[in-house]
Image (cartoon, rainbow, N blue to C red):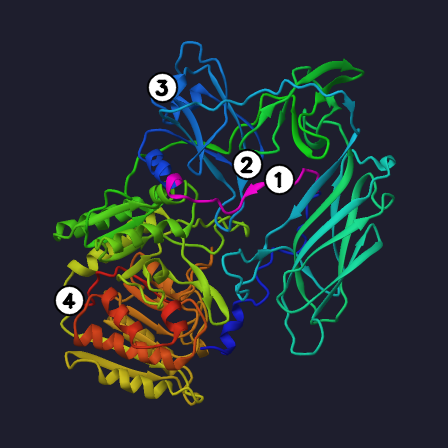
């Protein structure tokens, strides 16, 4: 319940990496990244054609010039004998320019080379942009060469932006829509700083620098006046302050005097000025400084004024190519003359364009970079060929074996099942990039065609899909993080909530398998439950927390009255007069095997109040027949935290014992709406005999509390019948 002392375990200020970790010095030029790709019907049509073909997917995480051999392409899905005139590279369904080497016999051979300019992505779900290389009809777009020669000499320095971002503070209480909730180090009254490296700083040029900052406010006090005042210093000298309020996200620019920056390391510090309640988080720091045109690692990306020529030094090879990448989707090679000089080589570059605009150039003395990965596309066409099915079972390759086991079992029962790999949905709906919208859009199309009946998500989710926290638990099947009261938290029903009333329009559940072994165990556990013998005596255990004005015991009595005569119910309540009695009764009931275990009261991610159920004790649920867990409390269903299973997840995920399914909240809610839903769930299960997924739909419809509707998730198969 909201306000309970146990909810303090969900840290208000986020999850911060261990003390002593240091920030790296940063010297790389700030990169452009794809944030929100434009989407048109024509792009989606092209993308779905690509997804249906044997072709190659190429993952790019950083901006740069990329090189792939024909051998790599042929080993990763490009059909043998592909003709050179058919090679096309696309991203977001839009053709991209490429440069080819070889292809002399008119087809792609192992020794041939494909090159292109690529940029990464920056979304809450991925840092990787997916490029598609496929044999398609149409004109192959090649990187052209500019033939113009400039006569006006240009500057020997360039304004060079370097960027610093760190992501290790997670703030679930920040309700910021689709933006991610990860930020960097805290800024408090104790000065914090970071070091920025400025290689090849040209202080003699007399050019100013520029410091650009974005912060995220955390504390929000009711006192009059602005909550935050942050003083900024560079190399000990004050450059300004940032004043803002509450949960604001300010962005500021501070010009820097030419003499302020130092060669090598530069220290930027932040100090909160408004006392202990003044707490914010660092988001992004960008420092632009005058940099000499000297290559690092045989390459340099830099700005130069059009219509001039410039010289870049510091190469170890004379084989230097230069590309204009002002528009990353349409790069072109520019005229460049390399020559030897003392200790290496330099290149004289003739910059295209006019003198009123800067151009972004890449001088490259290497063959290019390798992509993050190259993979074969598995053809799919779910967007056009999904038949009606009793169960749409969406899974991930990591846990596909368990999903297949369950799908085969349902088919043997005579039920049609569509077994869908979520990677296929990414390929068809979001251009190959992970995003919850891919799954929702697919299900929405099924719903519109009246082919959607039940949905099971077979795989675990994480609020950290980019693994900022380093816990290594993958986001196999994403959830939707949405504002629920004071918390941004998981709401699986969003995938099927097409009228946005907080209730899935088709029964939906999740089996939170995080590994292949766990996936198989969960499938076998569910099959054993449905096919095993039913105990002669069926029992239910209903537990209420201490009332303290919340009326938990009264609610427990109402629930008890809805149990049919065929179920032997036990209603218990925690009492300060006998603090251990409730726990003893719970464990004793579980040992006898229960049809359902119901809890009304205070709780947190892994616990119930007063130590009745403590963190890490899911292993004590060892009854021969696992019960349905109905947890009408806060946060027991917070399954999206990586490396830290919540109570409901731990019980459902146990290979034996535990719970067969759980209906629990990922958020903070009030008790009134909870009880309304709890009562209706019992009427649907024990009065109408509905499958679990339909019963959950009925239960949510019985309350108008939006936090209950959106935060209660079913961890279980919606087709399961409690028996």
Name the mark nearer the viewer: 1 or 4: 1
Name the mark nearer the viewer: 4 or 2: 2
The quarter of the displayed image where residue 352 is located? top right
Q: Which residues are magenta?
A: 26-43
Q: Are marks 3 and 2 in contact (CB under 8 Å)?
A: no
Q: Is residue 87 left or right of residue 623?
A: right
Residue tagged 2: 119
As for residue 31 lying within the magenta part, the answer is: yes
Element at label 4: loop
Element at label 2: loop
Q: CA distance from mark 3 to mark 2?
A: 26 Å
Name the mark nearer the viewer: 4 or 3: 3
Q: Is residue 360 visible?
A: yes
Instruction: Name the foreground residue: 115 vs 655.
Output: 115
Residue drawn where x is 62% and y is 50% of the image:
166
Q: Residues within 10 Å of mark 3 (few under 14, many from 20)?
A: some
Residue tagged 4: 534
Residue drawn where x is 76% and y is 29% of the image:
293
């Amino acid at each position: 319940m909201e306000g309970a002392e146990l909810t303090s375990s969900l840290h208000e200020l986020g999850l911060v990496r261990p003390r002593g970790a240091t920030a790296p010095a940063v010297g790389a030029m700030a990169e452009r990244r794809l944030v929100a790709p434009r989407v048109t019907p024509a792009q989606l049509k092209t993308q779905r054609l690509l997804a249906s073909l044997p072709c190659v997917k190429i993952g790019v995480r950083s901006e740069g010039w990329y090189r792939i051999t024909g051998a790599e392409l042929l080993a990763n899905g490009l059909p043998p004998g592909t003709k050179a005139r058919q090679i096309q590279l696309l991203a977001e369904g839009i053709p991209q320019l490429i440069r080819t080497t070889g292809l002399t016999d008119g087809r792609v051979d192992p020794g041939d080379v494909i090159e292109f300019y690529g940029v990464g992505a920056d979304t809450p779900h991925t840092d990787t942009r997916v490029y598609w290389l496929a044999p398609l009809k149409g004109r192959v777009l090649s990187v052209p060469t500019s033939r113009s020669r400039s006569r006006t000499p240009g500057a020997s320095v360039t304004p060079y932006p370097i960027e610093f971002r760190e992501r290790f503070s997670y703030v679930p209480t920040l309700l910021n829509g689709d933006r991610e909730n990860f930020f960097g180090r805290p800024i408090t009254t104790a000065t914090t700083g970071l070091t920025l490296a400025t290689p090849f700083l040209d202080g003699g040029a007399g050019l100013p620098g520029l410091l650009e900052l974005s912060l995220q406010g955390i504390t929000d006090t009711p006192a009059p006046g602005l909550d935050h005042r942050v003083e900024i210093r560079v190399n000990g000298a004050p450059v300004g302050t940032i004043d803002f309020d509450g949960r604001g996200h300010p962005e500021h620019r501070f010009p820097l005097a030419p003499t302020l920056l130092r060669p090598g390391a530069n220290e930027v510090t932040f100090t909160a000025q408004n006392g202990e309640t003044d707490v914010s988080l660092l988001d992004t720091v960008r420092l632009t400084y005058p940099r000499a045109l000297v290559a690092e690692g045989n390459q340099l990306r830099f700005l130069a004024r059009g219509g001039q020529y410039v010289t870049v030094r510091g190469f170890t090879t004379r084989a230097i190519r230069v590309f204009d990448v002002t528009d990353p989707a349409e790069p072109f090679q520019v005229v460049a003359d390399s020559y030897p000089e003392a200790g290496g080589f330099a290149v004289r570059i003739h910059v295209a364009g006019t003198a009123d605009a800067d151009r972004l150039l890449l001088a490259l003395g290497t063959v290019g970079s390798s992509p993050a990965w190259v993979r074969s596309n598995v053809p799919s066409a779910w967007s056009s060929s999904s038949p009606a099915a009793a169960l749409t079972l969406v899974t991930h390759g990591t846990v596909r074996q368990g999903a297949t086991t369950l799908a085969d079992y349902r088919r043997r029962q005579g039920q049609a099942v569509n077994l869908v790999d979520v990677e296929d949905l990414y390929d068809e709906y979001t251009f190959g990039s992970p995003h919850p919208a891919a799954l929702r859009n697919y299900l929405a199309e099924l719903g519109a065609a009246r082919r959607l009946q039940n949905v099971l998500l077979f795989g675990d989710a994480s609020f950290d899909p980019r693994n900022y926290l380093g816990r290594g638990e993958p986001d196999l099947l994403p959830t939707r993080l949405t504002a629920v009261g004071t918390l941004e938290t998981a709401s699986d029903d969003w995938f099927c909530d097409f009228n946005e009333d907080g209730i899935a329009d088709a029964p939906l559940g999740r089996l939170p398998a995080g590994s292949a072994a766990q996936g198989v165990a969960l499938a076998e556990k569910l099959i054993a439950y449905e096919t095993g013998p039913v105990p002669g005596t069926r029992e239910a255990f209903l537990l209420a927390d201490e009332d303290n004005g919340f009326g938990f015991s009264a609610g427990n009595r109402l629930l008890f009255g809805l149990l049919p005569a065929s179920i032997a119910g036990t209603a218990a309540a925690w009492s300060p007069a006998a603090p251990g009695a409730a726990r003893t009764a719970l464990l004793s009931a579980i040992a006898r095997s229960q049809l359902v275990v119901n809890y009304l009261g205070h709780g947190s991610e892994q616990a119930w109040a007063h130590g009745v159920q403590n963190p890490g004790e899911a292993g004590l649920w060892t009854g021969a027949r696992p019960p349905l867990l109905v947890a009408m409390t806060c946060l027991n269903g917070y399954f999206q935290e990586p490396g830290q299973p919540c109570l409901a997840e731990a019980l459902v995920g146990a290979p034996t014992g535990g719970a067969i399914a759980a209906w629990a909240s990922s958020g903070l809610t009030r008790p009134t709406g909870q009880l309304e839903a709890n009562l209706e769930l019992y009427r649907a299960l024990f009065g109408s005999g509905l499958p679990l997924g339909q019963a959950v739909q009925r239960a949510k419809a019985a309350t108008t509390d939006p936090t209950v509707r959106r935060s209660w998730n079913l961890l279980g198969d919606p087709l399961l019948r409690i028996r």
